[in-house]
Every structure is written in structure tokens, then in C-alpha cells.
Image (cartoon, rainbow, N blue to C red):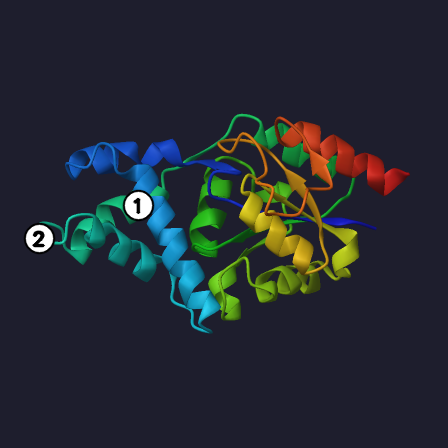
Amino acid sequence: MRGVLLDVNETLLDLSGLQPAFDYLGLPNALPLWFARTLRDGFALAASGDCRPFADVARAALVSLDPQRLTPANADVVLDAFTRLQPHPDVEPGLRMLADADIPAITLTVGSADTVAAIFDTHGLGDLVAGHLSAADFGRWKPAPAPYLAGCLALGLPPGDVTMVAAHAWDLHGAHRAGLRTAWIPRLEKQVPAIYSSPDIEGPDLPAVAAQIVGLSTS
């Protein structure tokens, strides 16, 4: 038996849906920088043995963009927009392919598992996954090993039987170091940087990756 862990932000959910919030705050070009800083700060906390909820890190990163004008309350506009994010069009068929093959899948986000669950339910995807996990609940953000290993435990499978699916090379490198198989979807990154381990599977979208995972489980 094989199982799948799924990154969420950008891999499954389209973060361009946050753009109206940044426009409202007068930061029309700041979305990529804000998300990069949020990840950077979460990684720094993990590397130092610390952990904070995504919302706290996201608020601090937003204020850092214009500290003379922005307050933590302004970040709530962005965080509220997360609840309205849309799945990429290929997510539903990819998840259905895994579900039809009886391959359990769990989302693993650095954000709120409850928010992800609500979005999945809104878009009729809830029955296609076995659950939702937040890395912050395990004391470290990805790419520290703990969240990946917790995901494997939730699936009831050893790491070698679990594939981490992500659009981020850093995420897959962390999963690889934790002993998981990896599958890359190049949503934004056009290639895997040479400093990271190569993914076991690559595909242009989730159905292409899912088909390869299904093939491995039946071979």
C-alpha cells in the first residue's frame, strides 16, 4: 500500500486569489515578497528549534513590508482572503484519480488545517482526502522532518511508502531527507535547483503525477 502527502499553498490552492487583498492594502506588487518572507521566517524559527502559527508569522511578514503604515490588523485582510482561495483546476481530477485507486491522501500545510478543510468542503473535495494536517501542530514547520513523519504516521505507513507532492523544491528536499518519495509539479518554479535532491516523480499537473503514483502502487 502507498499513501500521499500533499502540500497546499500553490500546490493545490491558487495564491493569486490573495491579490485583491494586497491591492486593497495598497501593496499591488507585494504578494510574492510577502509569501517569501513568511516562509523565510517560518523556516528560521524551525531551524532555531522554535515554531509559531502561520497567522503570527504572516502578520509579522506583512508589517515588515511597510512598518510605518501597516499594523498586524491589516494582515487580517490577507488571512481572511485565504479562506476564499480556489483550487487549481487540475486538483479535483488528480485527487479523484488517487481516491479511485484507493491511495489515501492527506494535506500537509504550514497554514491552518481547519482552513484547508473548509476550502475542500466548499469545493466538494473533502471526500477525496483522508484528512488535513498542519505542520505547526508538530512543533516545526516544513522542511523539518517532524511534519513529514507525522503525516506518515497519520497514514499508517512507513516513509518509504509515502510520496510527498509539492510545487516547492525545498519542500520535496525536506521530505526526501525524511525518507519519503517525492513528486514535483512546476507551478511557479521552472526547474529544481541543483542544491536540492531530484524528485522521484515529475509531472505538469496533479493528474500526471497521480497517474505515476498509481502506477507505482500497482506495479
Q: Residue at image x 56%, y 63%?
A: 144
Left or right of 132? Residue 200 is right
Left or right of 32? Residue 187 is right
Question: Could you say whether the residue bearing mark 1 is in a helix, strand or loop?
Answer: helix
Q: Residue at image x 17%, y 50%?
A: 74
Q: How far separated are the C-alphas under marks 1 and 2?
A: 16 Å
Nearer the observer, 211 or 44: 44
* CA neighbours of label 2 inside 10 A, class few (<14), some (14 to 19), many (20+): few
Q: What residue is pinned by disc 2?
A: 68
Q: Residue at image x 31%, y 42%?
A: 33
The residue sitting at the bottom extreme is 49
* CA neighbours of label 1 inside 10 A, class few (<14), some (14 to 19), many (20+): many
User: Label 2 near label 1: C-beta < 8 Å?
Assistant: no
What type is the residue that disc 1 sits on?
Trp
Q: Is residue 179 above or below residue 17?
A: below
Q: Is residue 32 above or below residue 135?
A: above
Residue 40 percent across, percent down from the top left: 39, 54
Q: Quadrant of residue 218?
A: top right
Quarter of the image with the C terminus in it: top right
